[in-house]
Image (cartoon, coloured by chain):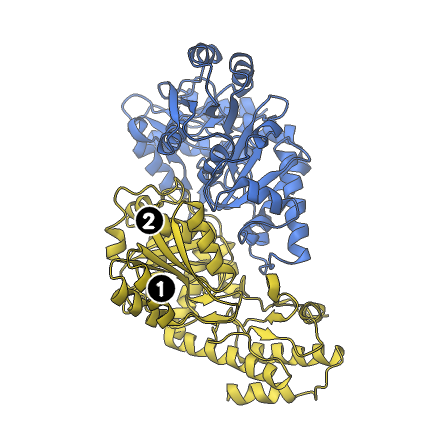
Chain colours: A blue, B yellow
Amino acid sequence: MFKPRLYAPGPVEVPPQVLEATARPVVHHRTAAFKELFLRTREKLAEVACVPGDDVLILAGSGTAGFEAGLLACVPKGTKVVGIDAGKFGERWVKLARGYGYEVVTLKLSWGRAADPEAVRTLLKEHPDVSAVMTTHSETSTGVLHDVQAIAEVVRETAPDALFLVDTVTSLGVAELRPKDWGFDGIFSGSQKGLMTPPGLAFAWLSERAWARTENLNPTFYLDLRKERKQQGAGQTAYTPAVSLIAGLEVALDMLLHEGLENVWHRRETLNRAVLEGAGTLGCRPYAQRVSPAVAALYVPEGVAAPDIVKGFSARGMRIAGGQDDAKPVLFRPSVMGYADRYDALIVVAALEEVLLELGQNVSPGQGLAAALNVLG
Amino acid sequence: MFKPRLYAPGPVEVPPQVLEATARPVVHHRTAAFKELFLRTREKLAEVACVPGDDVLILAGSGTAGFEAGLLACVPKGTKVVGIDAGKFGERWVKLARGYGYEVVTLKLSWGRAADPEAVRTLLKEHPDVSAVMTTHSETSTGVLHDVQAIAEVVRETAPDALFLVDTVTSLGVAELRPKDWGFDGIFSGSQKGLMTPPGLAFAWLSERAWARTENLNPTFYLDLRKERKQQGAGQTAYTPAVSLIAGLEVALDMLLHEGLENVWHRRETLNRAVLEGAGTLGCRPYAQRVSPAVAALYVPEGVAAPDIVKGFSARGMRIAGGQDDAKPVLFRPSVMGYADRYDALIVVAALEEVLLELGQNVSPGQGLAAALNVLG
């Protein structure tokens, strides 16, 4: 018997008290009870996103819906935008923008690389007329955390009129993220990652200068942030909200705020580093040049196929992610960004030891665990 | 003490076993377990929609997302379409289409009226070049069930090339609906009505001839039925699915299929008629010319304000809907389309008796209940 354990970079393990809240009887969305729940949840979400008091919009949809809504809300179609494409999700936003007729200039990086702010500067000097710069913060496909604070500064200096739009799907509630202090114009995220809630909700925040550009633009009918902002400020939504998921979200936000945001960031960074260090002693090098706390992206040791590692975890009831596209044979990605404590990090390393032994690697039991414990203190 | 009871035309009362399923630990969407759940659920959904074996797509979003996805998937922008506008939702699809640059000809009816198939014929004779006809089946805002079977026939006869797209948000799993036998080209619905699941899922089905027209069209990035069809046939989705809601949906579909679709339709028609007849003896006339089983749309008696009736129900723990827009002062709308049996219909009538008495109406206690029981048998 193995307990099922979700150690994938989303959806993540959801705390039982969050699951319980999603299973409460459905509250009608036109009642005072929902309005209060919704306004409270929005307020807490804004705190977790470090934009206290601001409008963070909650949509029924996945994270992709949030990014689409955000781009179309404040960047005119047909204009030139820069997309930082360093993995599956950076690539997605480039495709999204091309599909809508934006002229997209890409900063294309090989997988595992972090965007160099100076390379962004060089590109923006060639294209000072861009209307927006799009990037992921935590690129889940490669485990890279881009230095969005430094990139934001470069954007402000080099292309001061460009909006800086950031996919924070696996960084919100996971890595330090200060959209206002750092001068972002938009963040877009989802419920099933650092916010420890089942999938089905998207989130969007825009800066005041981004909101000022939303006039006269044509977003889609369903994903219309201006329409949502008008409704959500009054505790309503443009279309029927996913009430049950919102009830769960509030409980998860309470947990994060109770622990304290900086503690949460610290915990997640430590747990992820423990997995990386433990795996390192077992011959698995980190894949990411600049590590995101959302996921431990790891190269397989010589002679091991990544899908076999994923299968080995699976045989123990554990779901981790493999690599995508070209990285499939060499990359595996356990994640402890969900409802996880130090013992989860140890479990991941213990299972990795067992799996590598099974696959014929020269591992002495406890070797990875010792390294992980050294990080965990 | 009053138990909370949801008698609104959506979201509806969700069975506890469905709520329980939504609260199970989240299953990762790239696992065999999810794939099986998803394929099973799609198959059952297709049965409930009377399109067994066909692709019914499941999206994370509200019903509006489904209709937007469907229209943009198979009807070229800029072409002429007919919209039957006989209430809040018919009006929404007209706005949606206008927003995307379709030339929309409306069949505008006063609220409470059902679309006359012959009026549709006359309109289509003037506009034989339309690419699509859009209507609601059950217009929730007025309680009308349009005769979509007859309208479909008229469309086929008068404008054989036009696609017939039907909003079935409050008819799917509620009223008789046979999209294939009746010659529809698309139905679009949501989870929180007849399917007794919390809000957050949209559904879309297209006919083969509608699918054949999806080539070279530009839907939105997030709501792209072609992309979804390719993925969903293999048990996957284009973007992270709302796993928990899908788990709940399967349980609800099992309940409906176990009862038998025709029995479900019969039950819902009977319960709704019991409410209407009971209310009728209390001086509340039906608002709808042709009654939808999804909702008992009722005129207030002379001298009573509809919001006071809604408040009276609310004081008893019951949520019903009032009227929208101009109908606000005169219309109230209890609904027993959710998880409801004969005793729920009686409860609604009993509460209405009490509320009308409180509001000074001349009602003898039990008078409405006797009429309702007469219907229930």
Residue drawn at point x = 47 percent, y = 38 percent: A218
Q: Around disc 2, counting alpha carbons within 10 Å, would you say few (fewer than 14), some (14 to 19), or many (20 or more)?
A: some
Q: Around disc 1, counting alpha carbons within 10 Å, would you say few (fewer than 14), some (14 to 19), or many (20 or more)?
A: some
- Of residue B104 and residue A184, the one placed in the foreground of this image is B104
**Type of residue at label 1?**
Leu
Q: Is residue A35 above or below residue B87?
A: above
Q: In this view, does A365 lie above or below B64?
A: above
Q: How many labels, in total?
A: 2
| Res. A340 in view | no
- Determine the image quadrant of residue B366: bottom right
Q: Which mark is residue B1?
A: none
Using the numbered discs, state the Cα–Cα distance from disc 2 to disc 1 in whole angstroms: 16 Å
- Determine the image quadrant of residue A284: top left
- Of residue A75 and residue A168, the one placed in the foreground of this image is A75
Which badge, 2 or 1, comes first in the chain's sequence? 2
Helix or strand or loop: what does disc 1 sit on?
helix
Residue A152 locus on image (x, y percent): 54, 19
| Res. B27 in view | yes
Residue drawn at point x = 38 percent, y = 48 percent: B102
- Of residue A297 and residue A45, the one placed in the foreground of this image is A45
Residue A211 locus on image (x, y percent): 58, 32
Left or right: where A259 falls relative to A284: right
Q: Where the N terminus of chain B falls, by quadrant?
A: bottom right
Mark 1 highlights which residue? B123
Please give the chain letter of the residue carrying mark 1.
Answer: B
- Mark 2–mark 1 contact, CB under 8 Å? no
Q: Which mark is residue B79?
A: 2
Residue A301 locus on image (x, y percent): 33, 22
Instruction: Single out the mark in the foreground, 2 or 1.
Output: 1
**Type of residue at label 2?**
Thr
Q: In this view, does A43 lie above or below B277?
A: above
Residue A245 locus on image (x, y percent): 55, 50
